[in-house]
Structures are given as C-alpha cells and as structure tokens.
Amino acid sequence: MNGNMIIKNAAELVTCSGFNAKKGKEMAELHIIHDGAVVVKEGRIAAVGKTKEILTEIEKSRHDLTSFDAIDAANKAVLPGFVDSHTHFVFGGYRAEEFSWRLRGDTYMEIMQRGGGIINTVESTRRATEAELMKSGIKRLDSMLSIGVTTVEGKSGYGLDKDTEIKQLAVMVHLNNVHYVDVVRTFLGAHAVPQNYKGKEDAFIDYLIEEVMPDVAERNLAEFCDVFCEKNVFSVDQSRRLLSRAKKLGLKLKLHADEIVQIGGAELAAELGAVSADHLLQASDEGIRRMSESGVVATLLPGTAFSLKEPYARGRFIIDNNCAVALATDFNPGSCFSESIPLIFALATLYMDITIEEAVTALTLNGAAALDRADTIGSIDVGKMGDIIVLEYPSYKFIPYHLGVSTVEKVIKAGNLIYDKEKGGIIHC
Ligand code: NIG
Ligand code: FE
C-alpha cells in the first residue's frame, strides 16, 4: 500500500476535469479521454492522458515502475470516486415502524411533531456507546465504499445535547482515522428542538451558540455547521443567528433549506455565503437566482423526496438557472434510509430531468465543491488525490442504465486498490 498505481487502456477515462464547482451548462462537460491512462504516485495523481502517450512518456523518462500496481481497464470506464456530500450516517437505532406509518399515510412532519422522527433517533443515539456507533459506522462506510464512495460527509444532530453531539462528532473523527473512506464532519446541533426546549427554540439556539459550538470549533470537531431551517423547526431568523455565530468561529455553512415549506432558506444561504443549501424541494425562483449569483452549491437529495413521496426538487430549472448542483443520498434512519448511489442516479436522470453527464458531475466534482474540496478531490486531474473507480462496463452511461445496481468493479483510494468485486470485495491490509 504505497499509493503508486497505473490504470491503463480505459475505454473511457471520465476525468470530470476541474478545480471549481461546475455551474449550469458546464455540468455537462465530462472531459473524457478514450483509451485513457492515469498514473498515481504516492497517493496523488501524477499524469493523465492517452494510454499510448503516458506509456511513451514513462519509457522516455526511464521511470521505474516496479513499485506501481497496474490495472488494465480495457473495456471499462474509469471515473473519480463518488463524493456523497450530505448524510447523517452516525446514529443509534432504526425507525422501520415509522416507515410503515408513512406508508399508511402519516406525514414525516406529523410523526416528528408527536415526538417521533428525529427525536426518536436522538433517544437511541444518546443511549448508544461510542463502540456501538463505531461498529455500525464502519459497516455503513464499508457499504458506501463498495458502491464507489471515497469521501462522505456526516452530520451530528442526533444528540441535541453537548455530550451526545460531541460523541457523534468524535466517532466520525475516529472513523475517518480507521476507515479508507474520508469522513467530513458537520455540526448539526440545530436539527430538531429537544423535548426540554419545546416552545423555547430561541433559548435552544442560545444554548448551542454559547455552550456547544465554541467547543466544537475549538476542538476542530467539525468543519461545517448546518441547521434544519424549516417551518415548525428553526425559523430563518434563528438559523441566521446560529449560522452567523458559526461563521465567526470559523465554521463553513450548510443549510437544510426549503425542504417541506418555502420559508426563504435558499435566500438565507445566499445572504450568508453558505457553501451549500440542501434539499430545496420548495425553493423559490428568487432564492435559486440568488444562490447562483453567490455561488452556493445546490445539493439535491432525490432519495429523500422519493422516500417521503414529495415532489422532486426542480433539478432542470436549477441547472438552467446557472447553479452548481450536487447530488447526495441524505442517508439517515428516517426520511431516506439508503446510501444507494445507484438509486440517486436513477431518480435524478429519470425523474428530475438531469442528464447522465450532469449527474456524474453532481456526484463527483460538485459533490467535492459542496464540501469545499473541489481543489483536491472530485476529478481526475494532476495533483488531486488518487481516488478513482473502475466500472465493470465500458461507459459511464451504464451507471443509471443498470437500474438501482452498482456498476463499480474496483475502488482505488489514494492510489491503493481497496475494493475489487472480482476479488471478493474490500481488500483489508
Ligand atoms: O435531511 N430534514 C431533516 N433531517 C434529515 C432527516 C433526519 C431524520 O429523519 O432522521 C433530512 O431529511
Ligand atoms: Fe439531511
């Protein structure tokens, strides 16, 4: 495991080349190299081009390739690893019963208002030990890795008290250290109003600002701060107050915005210069316009709309209005208990009028941009991290075409082969 790798003869080397979020029309540009090769040296991408040219260069420079692993990707497509930029994957307990209630007609918000939903998971996450959260976290990361995810974002928000919020974040620090998949941490203390603060939402925001956030920032437990800005959860004013303080403490901003009711979440994201605004099922035209102007990434989560039987976010409209769109799973125990990237591809392309090319950008470079990492991951460009996937098919077009099933054959993380379907799965060293 030295991070040295050469992948050659790729039918399609889908580079997704770029170092910034792609907006609007740019999202369709995948910069494909046919019969492509990529060289990764000590974890970083060192060369990208036609196989013939790369091999000639190597020969000319008399580079010693003995320490390099080689993958022959003939008849296969090669892409950057997927970036799942919005999940809540560290939690205790499950909510299968609530899923069956929703099938009977109860809405997500009705269940939440009678003390179920997020609060239900809060109770089980408070009870869970760090070891239990680690165990389930590793299992979930293994599953993500096997479908091509090389970087994932994870949120706290199932504690709603200082100890448990910090426990969740600390578990993610540990997971990031022990697992191949990179874990980016977001503080989502304002995910719901805990029972002891019912009707005192402003006081809960004060508690988060004064008691919890300073520790989170000082101990570097999170890079982002997020809030569930929603009718009957946290208002625009409360969200603004929380996020403004987070920004002062050096945290970057994200919002769960306009998911169920249009209350101006997209506008607030633009006003505060958030890195991303997520969900946006009900976002206004004006909010979308302002997000485009301010360069806020619009992270769309079609798995959630599907699972809640809500109308999808207006993907086509948002791209046509020159926004940068990322797609993510929102993996969580309630509104979308699925880490399936294939499902997201299927929903985005079949139901949101997003093209396959745009969906690929949304799950690679723009996913990276939603995590403020477009300069280091999300594309196959020289200098970036060697996070690469090899499909079992010759074209990226097979990703949504093979409906709901992973087409990923190999995953390379920082230049090391860590998953190979043909060798039985994850390669433990
Ligand atoms: O993004 N909307 C708020 N939060 C999550 C759901 C979390 C849960 O139901 O546990 C979401 O959908
Ligand atoms: Fe979410």
Image (cartoon, rainbow, N blue to C red):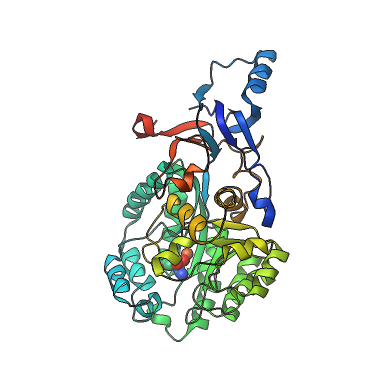
Question: Depth check: 73 or 364 in front?
Answer: 73
Question: Depth check: 218 or 72 in front?
Answer: 72
Question: Depth check: 164 or 330 in front?
Answer: 330
Q: Quadrant of the C terminus?
A: top left
Q: Is residue 26 positioned above or below 427 on the image?
A: below
Question: Depth check: 151 or 11 in front?
Answer: 11
Percent x, y for residue 2? 52, 26
Q: Residue shown at 53%/82% (left/top)?
A: 202
Q: Residue shown at 53%/31% (left/top)?
A: 415
The image quarter in which residue 354 lies: bottom right
The image quarter in which residue 255 lies: bottom right
The image quarter in which residue 410 lies: top left
Mark yes or no: residue 86 visible: no
Q: Residue shown at 68%/54% (left/top)?
A: 25
Mark yes or no: residue 287 visible: yes
Percent x, y for residue 374? 64, 48
Percent x, y for residue 116? 33, 75
Q: Is residue 358 positioned above or below 228 on the image?
A: above
Ligand 1 visible in quadrant: bottom left
Percent x, y for residue 164? 40, 64
Most extreme residue toward the right is: 293
